[in-house]
Amino acid sequence: MRLKGKRVAILVENLYQDLEVWYPLLRLKEEGAEVVVVGSGSAKTYTGKYGYPVEADRSASEVKADEFDAVIIPGGYAPDIMRRYPAMVQLVREAHEQGKVVASICHGGWMLASAKILPGKTVTSFSAIKDDLEHAGATFVDVEVAVDGNLITSRKPEDLPAFLRATIAALEAG
């Protein structure tokens, strides 16, 4: 129960990468964190790339960054849809500005770019969006997890153990 008292938002939209939502959700609950699934507001239930559904607890327009200790952005194609919702982008930007942990994996980097929090940061992601992140001002590195201040990034589902170790360590320290 290393994270008892910590609150974490996991962002969701349709076509999320199933493991990148469910692995953090269950792992953080296992450590005692309160995990809130935050949807864009387009639906109550969202379906992953492989068909697994997740129900949102709240929509992005109903929450504020100061309610959470961390925001997790999974990949898949969901981030491309998420960034079309200003409340989701604002949640990520405000969490970063408030020094909260912002953890993004795979294509989640698209949300970081849309939130305009990448200039001067060192990050990783799925290789297909490397150029997008560099154009947004980041330095790209090809490692399983990159930690730059309160920003934690990883590349793909296989990196989830390292991604969660870094996220849990950051939450414990904060």
Image (spheres, helix red, strand yellow):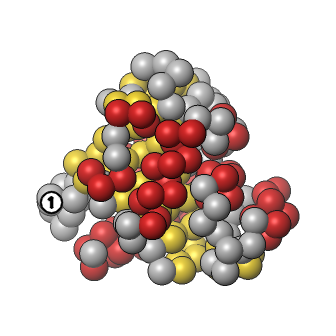
Q: Position of residue 35 (x, y in %)?
A: 29, 46
Tell me the residue at 50%/39% (across/down). Answer: 87
Tell me the residue at 35%/74% (across/down). Answer: 170
Q: Is residue 79 above or below residue 117?
A: above
Tell me the residue at 51%/49% (across/down). Answer: 90
- Residue 112: name its quadrant: bottom right
Amino acid at pointer 1: Lys
Residue 31 seen in the current view: yes
Tell whether 149 sits left or right of 159.
left
Q: Is residue 132 above or below residue 67?
A: below
Q: Is residue 88 above or below residue 119?
A: above
Which residue in the protein does label 1 denote?
A: 4
- Residue 144: name its quadrant: bottom right
Residue 143 seen in the current view: no
Q: Position of residue 59 (x, y in %)?
A: 40, 31
Tell whether 126 sits left or right of 70.
right
Q: Nearer the viewer, residue 32 or 130?
A: 130
- Image quadrant holding the N terminus, namely bottom left
- Image quadrant holding the C terminus, namely bottom left
Q: Residues within 10 Å of mark 1 (few under 14, many from 20)?
A: some
Q: Nearer the viewer, residue 110 or 18?
A: 110
Q: For the residue labelled by badge 1, is the local secondary structure a helix, a strand or a loop?
A: loop
Number of marks in the rendered image: 1
Tell whether 132 sits left or right of 148.
right
Q: Position of residue 88 (x, y in %)?
A: 51, 42
